[in-house]
Structure formats: C-alpha cells, structure tokens
Image (cartoon, rainbow, N blue to C red):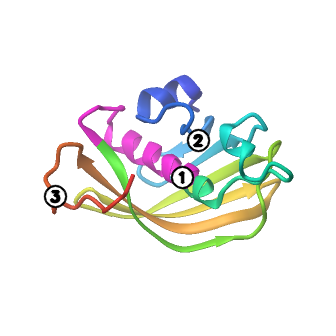
Amino acid sequence: MMDIREILATLPHRFPIILVDRVLELETGKRIVAIKNVSANEPVFTGHFPHYPVMPGVLILESMAQTAAILSFVSAGHKAQSDSLYYFAGIDKARFKRPVIPGDQLRLEVTLTRELRGVAKYEARALVDGQLACEAELMCAYRPVNAEPGQGLPPGGG
C-alpha cells in the first residue's frame, strides 16, 4: 500500500527516528496497518541493553504514533510539511506485554476512534508474530509549528 518513499513523503520524520517501514492496509479515516522491522544495527541498541538488546517502550509507542499520523495525514489529504506537525497530546492505558528485540517485526494496528478540531484519538496495538507486544490509547494534535503558547500544543509533545 505504501513503501518507505511514500511514508517519507507523508511524515516529517527522518533517520534515526523514522519508525514505520511499510503500510500494508489503510482505510481512509478509519484504520491502518503498518510494519516496523526491528534491526540490530539501530543506534538505540548499543545502550539498551548491550547484553540483551530490547526496543524501548517509548519507541514502540512512537512507532504507533507515527502510524496514526500517517492515517491522519492521508485521511486529511496532507503531505509532510515544514509548517505543521502531529504532536503527541496524550497516552492512556499503555501496556507492554512482551519485549521487542532485534529481528522482530512489529505489526502496528491503529484505529481512529474520534477526531475533533485537529485532535484525534486512536486505539493502537503492536504485535510480534501475532502476540501482543504493546497496546495503548493515543491522542495526537495537528498544529502549526509556529503556534503561540497556549494554542493546544502539548508540553514536550512530539
């Protein structure tokens, strides 16, 4: 459905923080299924943890959020722009069920549950070989980059 070139044309993220490799399914305004291939040569694994590399939970959440952003960008007909971004606005009910290690392939399943005035809520799951690795409710906000403080930008979000 979307290869890495199309993903890079849609998201503003770049190496080393682009965390979606391919989109398998996309129902505009509803749901998306994407893939993140977890590789041993990703920079994070040199320190987390050298003796037993484990993908940090925050990066699993970020991969789900990037997948949600692709869904929202495509649904709204937007491409990567330097003047606006999707920011994390909230994470609820995050649960980690199994470690994700190099060689795993994350299947990222995200469903849009609500959208109002540029703020969207999603149910997201990350699976490895059909086993749940992480699930969470995500909230993201679409905002101009040059927005004034107090215009809905989450503190420290992104």
First reached walking from the N terminus: tag 2 or tag 1: 2
Q: Amino acid at mark 1?
A: Glu
In the picture of the structure, the residue carrying the numbered disc 1 is 62
Q: Amino acid at mark 3?
A: Pro
What's the magenta region?
A: 62-84
Q: Nearer the viewer, residue 132 or 13?
A: 13
Q: Nearer the viewer, residue 85 or 30?
A: 85
In this view, which residue lies farthest toward the left?
148
Q: Which mark is residue 105?
A: none
Distance from disc 2 to disc 1, alpha carbons, whole Å, reads 7 Å
Q: Nearer the viewer, mark 3 or mark 2?
A: 3
Q: Residue 1: image x %, image y %?
A: 58, 32
First reached walking from the N terminus: tag 3 or tag 2: 2
What SS does tag 1 mark? helix
Q: Residue 8: image x %, image y %?
A: 48, 28
The residue shown at (53%, 44%) is 26
Q: Amino acid at mark 2?
A: Leu
Relative height, residue 141 to residue 43 (above, below): below
In the picture of the structure, the residue carrying the numbered disc 2 is 19
